[in-house]
Image (cartoon, grey):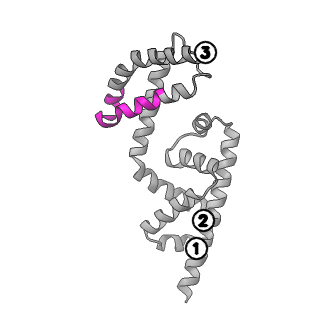
Amino acid sequence: MMKEDQEQLFKSLFDQYYPPLTVYVRGLVGDSDAEDIVEDVFEELWNYRNRIEVGEKIGSFLYRSALSHSLNFLRHQNLSRRHLELIKKINVQAIAVDEQTEAMERMEYDELSRRVMEAISELPEKCREAFKLRYIYGMKTKEVSDALDISPRTVEAHLYKALKLLRKQFLVALLILVLLSCE
C-alpha cells in the first residue's frame, strides 16, 4: 500500500474510532488522561501499520489496545505499591546471607528506594526494559516478550542478567555499609 493510501486509511480510522475510544477509556481511567491514552493507541497503530492487517476486526483490535494501554496506565498509577513490592523481591532474590539481610534492614526506606532506582537505571537498556515490565509493572514473561517483540527465553535471559547485576551492586553497597559501621 502506498504511503498516501496508508495515511488516508489511518485518517479514516482515526476519525471513526477516536471519539468512541476516548469515551471508552474515560470510563476506565477518568477524563484527564483518556485522550493521551487514545493518542498512544493510534500512534502504536501507525508505528505498526506494516504489520497490522486492517480488516473487519480492526475495531476489536483498537478497543483491546485501548484496554491494554489503560491497564498499563492504571498499573503505573499504582507504582508506589509496586515499588515497595519490587524492593521486597530484590531483597529476597538478591540477598542470601543473613548478615547481608540484616544490613539491608538497617537501611532506611528512602535510601534503599533511591539506590534501587539508581541501580535499575544503570542496567543495560534491554535488561532494564524487561526488568521494569516484569517486576515494576507486574507483567508476565509472555506479556513482556510480546511488548518487547522478543522471545520469552530472551526475556528470561535479560531478567537473569538484570538480577545478577543488581545483586552484585547491592552486595558492594552492603560491604561498604559494613565497613563504615566497623569504623
Q: Sort mark 3 into few (<14), some (14-19) or many (20+) by Cα contacts within 10 Å.
A: few
As drawn, the label of residue 119 is none
Q: Position of residue 68 (x, y in %)?
A: 47, 31
Q: Secondary structure at mark 2?
A: loop
**Which of the two discs, 2 and 1, sits closer to the camera?**
1
Which residue corresponds to the image point at 56% horizontal and 45% vertical from the top-left?
A: 134
Query: Circle 3 is placed at which residue position?
Result: 2
Q: Position of residue 48 (x, y in %)?
A: 58, 26
19 sits to left or right of 5: left
**Which of the two discs, 2 and 3, sits closer to the camera?**
3
Query: Circle 2 is placed at which residue position?
Result: 95
Query: Circle 1 is placed at which residue position?
Result: 174
Q: Position of residue 143 (x, y in %)?
A: 57, 36
Question: Splitting the image into 4 quarters, where does residue 151 fall?
Answer: top right
- In this picture, which residue range is highlighted in magenta? 25-42
Question: Splitting the image into 4 quarters, where does residue 28 fall?
Answer: top left
Q: Residue 37 magenta-drawn?
A: yes
Q: Residue 79 magenta-drawn?
A: no
Which residue corresponds to the image point at 56% horizontal and 28% vertical from the top-left?
A: 47
Q: Position of residue 14 (x, y in %)?
A: 43, 19
The answer to whether the residues at label 3 and label 1 have Cβ atoms under 8 Å apart is no
Q: Earlier in the sequence, mark 3 or mark 1?
A: 3
Which residue corresponds to the image point at 43% horizontal and 70% vertical from the top-left?
A: 108
From mark 3 to mark 1, how far is it between C-alphas? 59 Å
Q: Amino acid at mark 1?
A: Leu
Q: Secondary structure at mark 1?
A: helix
